[in-house]
Image: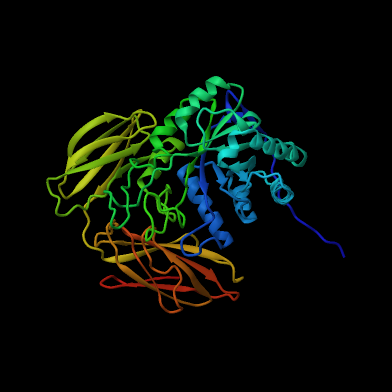
């Protein structure tokens, strides 16, 4: 009898240049990255393997090409998903520490993950306070870097420093200078240390709440546009143009790709969820379309906000258009509101007096035209259930995500709906979690069997199914008061 172990591997060439940033197989690639905690509404940190793939696919659709596992060793299944789907990974140990216990943890991390082709850089720590600028931190970093060189001489390392143009301490010895925010110091630091590559380990941190368009300190919401950031962070448009326009700036990782439990900045309890995500639990916020405009080659044209503002007739609505078009023209009920040139790595705005109807944008791309619209809808009429897959392995572990929204009688999605939806399931499967992206919701993510429910938050909610260990048809039924019942098989 012989034991066997199958290991997947990949072949690629990684080079980190102080003048050109990241070179992947010899070609410059800007790091368009996100930080993520392993946390998803409905299931917490105990993600089924399929949910790892689901989240990485969502990030790739946004235009993300790199994932920072912040701030702890990722589950191996996440790395498998990144290997399979083509996502670069910055792997990170939690603490900068050269004691035997922490060196042992670091060794186990490197030995476990060094065969993954998605891995392109190690991070030896994150925001270690006073020690990062003194000789103690420098010596600890030197110890860890020497140990890392023995374990994996093929990759370089960074340290996530929340410092501006500061060189003393860890930054003196770290191969790649990592910036957590402090983007205002990046240009000066590069001028003073032109031979050291630079990457934004944490950038941005705009706080937004999907579908909300004013600051609401009672319900603990912030506007769903790129306008609000904590004092220590910045909006997307403050850091990304700087990064995009300088080839020596390798790129950066936005804090964060998706929302997570805890850190409800700028609020406190009873607000229970972060607002940092470009997506909440997988549903795009409007900042999603800013990054997508400049991170993808495909045409992007998006209008925000929605156009259901009953009671505000005649009042000005702040309309944003995110696009990578050359020019954009806005129309309200067929009447042009003007054409504007789209500045690179920015967005466009119009102030539009509200009238019910259709708000439409036309994007002009070197002779091509692309159109999109938002329109005033009727009341919610029926539910729509959208699964990420229709077949599950009958192994008791496979999972599927079902996104839920409602449409009016004309089939138009209702962005303001907050209906309570009740779910039931028949067949060899079970519901394991529900969520809706509301950072102030105290509805349970786990419900007793036969009593699963979740309220829509600004038109959307989500549930996660898991298979049983026997084959058969699974039937999911959704019921809402005054809405047509829907079944998903």
Q: Quadrant of the N terminus?
A: bottom right
Asked whether the viewer can see residue 223, the reply is yes
Please state if 265 lies on the left or on the right of 151 as rendered.
left
Q: Measured along the vertical axis of the image, is residue 282 above or below residue 428?
A: above
Q: Is residue 317 left or right of residue 56?
A: left
Q: Residue at x 51, y 53 (%)?
A: 55
Position of 104 with respect to 380 (left or right) is: right
Q: Position of residue 329 (x, y in %)?
A: 25, 34
Answer whether residue 299 is visible to the viewer in this image: no
Vertical position of residue 421 compared to residue 240: above or below: below
Q: Position of residue 100 (x, y in %)?
A: 74, 49
Quarter-wise, where is residue 298 in the image? Answer: top left
In front of the other: 340 or 20 = 20
Residue closest to the eye, 40 or 304: 40
Counting from the top left corner in percent of width and height, residue 187 is at 49, 24
Instruction: Give me the residue at 22% from left, 56% from top.
Output: 377
If the image is split into quadrants, where does the C terminus sit?
bottom left
Give the total number of marks visible in the rendering. Answer: 0
């Amino acid at each position: 009898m012989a034991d066997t172990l199958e290991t997947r591997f990949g072949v690629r060439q990684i080079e980190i240049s102080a003048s050109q940033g990241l070179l992947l197989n010899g070609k410059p690639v800007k790091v368009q990255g996100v930080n993520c905690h392993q946390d998803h509404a409905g299931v917490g940190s105990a993600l089924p393997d399929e949910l790892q793939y689901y989240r990485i696919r969502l990030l790739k659709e946004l235009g993300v090409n790199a994932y920072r596992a912040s701030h702890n060793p990722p589950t191996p299944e996440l790395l498998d998903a990144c290997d399979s789907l083509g996502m670069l990974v910055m792997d990170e140990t939690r603490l900068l520490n050269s004691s035997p216990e922490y060196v042992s943890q670091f060794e186990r991390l490197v030995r476990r993950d060094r065969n993954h082709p998605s891995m392109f850089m190690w991070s030896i720590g994150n925001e270690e306070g006073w020690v990062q600028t003194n000789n103690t931190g420098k010596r600890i970093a030197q110890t860890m870097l020497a140990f890392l060189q023995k374990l994996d001489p093929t990759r370089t390392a960074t340290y996530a420093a929340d410092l501006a143009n500061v060189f003393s301490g860890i930054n003196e010895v770290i191969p790649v200078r990592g910036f957590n925010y402090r983007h205002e110091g990046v240009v000066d630091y590069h001028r003073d240390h032109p031979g050291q590559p630079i990457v934004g380990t944490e950038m941005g941190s705009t706080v937004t709440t999907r579908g909300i368009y004013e600051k609401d300190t009672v319900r603990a919401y912030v506007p769903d546009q790129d306008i609000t950031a904590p004092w220590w962070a910045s909006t997307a448009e403050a850091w990304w143009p700087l990064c995009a326009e300088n080839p020596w700036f390798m790129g950066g990782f936005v804090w964060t790709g998706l929302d997570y439990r805890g850190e409800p900045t700028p609020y406190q309890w009873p607000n229970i969820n972060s607002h940092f995500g470009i997506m909440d639990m997988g549903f795009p916020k409007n900042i999603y379309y800013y990054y997508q405009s400049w991170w993808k080659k495909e045409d992007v044209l998006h209008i925000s906000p929605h156009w259901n503002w009953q009671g505000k007739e005649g009042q000005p609505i702040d309309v944003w258009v995110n696009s990578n078009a050359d020019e954009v023209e806005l129309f309200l009920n067929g009447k042009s509101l003007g054409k504007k040139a789209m500045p690179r790595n920015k967005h466009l705005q119009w102030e539009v007096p509200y009238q019910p109807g259709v708000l439409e944008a036309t994007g002009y791309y070197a002779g091509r035209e692309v159109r999109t619209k938002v329109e005033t809808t009727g009341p919610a009429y029926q539910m729509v259930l959208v699964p990420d897959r229709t077949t599950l392995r009958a192994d008791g572990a496979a999972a599927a995500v079902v996104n839920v929204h409602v449409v009016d009688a004309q089939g138009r999605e209702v962005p303001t709906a907050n209906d309570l939806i009740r779910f039931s399931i028949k067949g060899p499967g079970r519901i394991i979690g529900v969520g809706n992206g509301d950072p102030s919701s105290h509805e349970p993510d786990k419900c007793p069997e036969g009593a699963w429910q979740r309220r829509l938050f600004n038109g959307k909610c989500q549930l996660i199914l898991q298979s049983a260990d026997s084959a058969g048809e699974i039937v999911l039924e959704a019921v809402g008061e005054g809405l047509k019942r829907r079944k998903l098989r």
